[in-house]
Image (tube, rainbow, N blue to C red):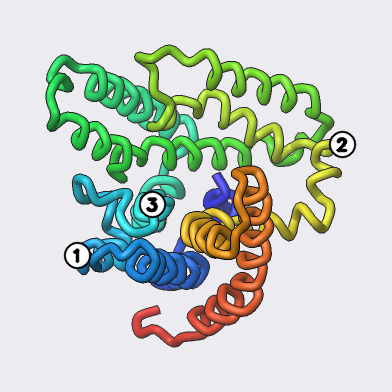
Amino acid sequence: FVMMIAYGSKPKIHPISYLQNRFARIYPIYLLAIILSVFYQYYVEKKPLVLTDILLNSLALQSWIPSKAMSVNFPGWSLSVEFLFYAVFPLIFNYLYIKFSLKKLVIPILLFWIFSQILFMWAINSDWQISEVPRETENFLFYFPLMHLNQFLLGNLAGLFFIIHLKNKANNYDWAIILLSVILVCALYFKLNEINYHNGLLAVFFVPFIILFSLNNGYITRLFSKKIFIYLGEISYGIYILQIPVFMMTKYILLKIGISGDLVIFIIGIMTLLIFSAISYQYIEIPLREKIKKLRIPFK
């Protein structure tokens, strides 16, 4: 959705420039998280280094390989998926989105989303899951990038629909957002065992939620427009990708100095994560992003 909002009005995307910008935005902190995770696992947990795991994570390929998605820094599995999205976006934008009307794109993308849900549900609920091997197979399906492509395309479609039909329809949608939030919580709480949301099924709620949030000019939007929330949004990527190594090292240090208690460790861990993410954003993410963006790449 955000990619389409950012690029939807452009006549074309230049793939090299686009990928350079995305790499500059994502990779520096992603690599920092890997380094911290390896440091913690090797020096604190005394685990041997698995060079193939480190290499796969460094190349953001871990989610493509069975049993490797959660290796090293396991929140990184989603970045392995995101890199696929970034790789295909210039292609589908240049050869589909700017050449075909919204009406011609709706049915293929919706059908692909429906097919992906059916395939995923069938795969994780089939009889052949009754053995030891399927557990790895199921995990592979959970994290395999191609199984998540339907979500990205549906987000693109929502962004395109927003640009064409909705961007000038701002209004107060606070109650609609609250209602959808309640529905989402209920959907999570009362979920049937046979249903799994991991592959984009909740898009039926998230798409209208994101669109309404984007159009909203009510109290909720004014609240999240405060500087503190904007700044938390800016450092949120660091909070996400650094959460495991920073939190685990904080917990290790606290226990070493005699501070215990789950709630105390959790609160101090969260505060440490926020501070560390803010520092890395200011002194690593922003400077390296600007330097990478300024690199002169041939055939740009």
Kind of residue sitting beneath label 3: Phe
Q: CA distance from mark 3 to mark 2?
A: 36 Å
Report crowding for label 2: few under 14, some 14 to 19, many 20 or more residues within 10 A (C-alpha). Answer: few
Question: What x and y, as percent, mark residue 19?
Answer: 42, 67
| Residue labelled with disc 2 | 219
Dots 1 and 2: beta carbons under 8 Å? no
- Nearer the observer, 235 or 220: 235
Report crowding for label 1: few under 14, some 14 to 19, many 20 or more residues within 10 A (C-alpha). Answer: few
- Nearer the observer, 176 or 127: 127
Element assignment for label 2: helix
Q: Nearer the viewer, mark 1 or mark 2?
A: 1
Question: What x and y, as percent, mark residue 165?
Answer: 65, 34
Element assignment for label 1: helix
Q: CA distance from mark 3 to mark 1?
A: 15 Å
State which quarter of the image contains the N terminus.
Answer: top right
**The image quarter in which residue 289 lies:** bottom right
| Residue labelled with disc 3 | 74
Residue occupying the point 43% across, 51% down: 75
Mark 1 and mark 2 lie on one chain; the one further toward the N terminus is 1
Q: How many marks?
A: 3
**The image quarter in which residue 30 lies:** bottom left
Judge whether residue 14 can be spotted in this image. Answer: no
- Nearer the observer, 209 or 110: 209
Q: Nearer the viewer, mark 3 or mark 2?
A: 3
Kind of residue sitting beneath label 1: Thr
| Residue labelled with disc 1 | 52
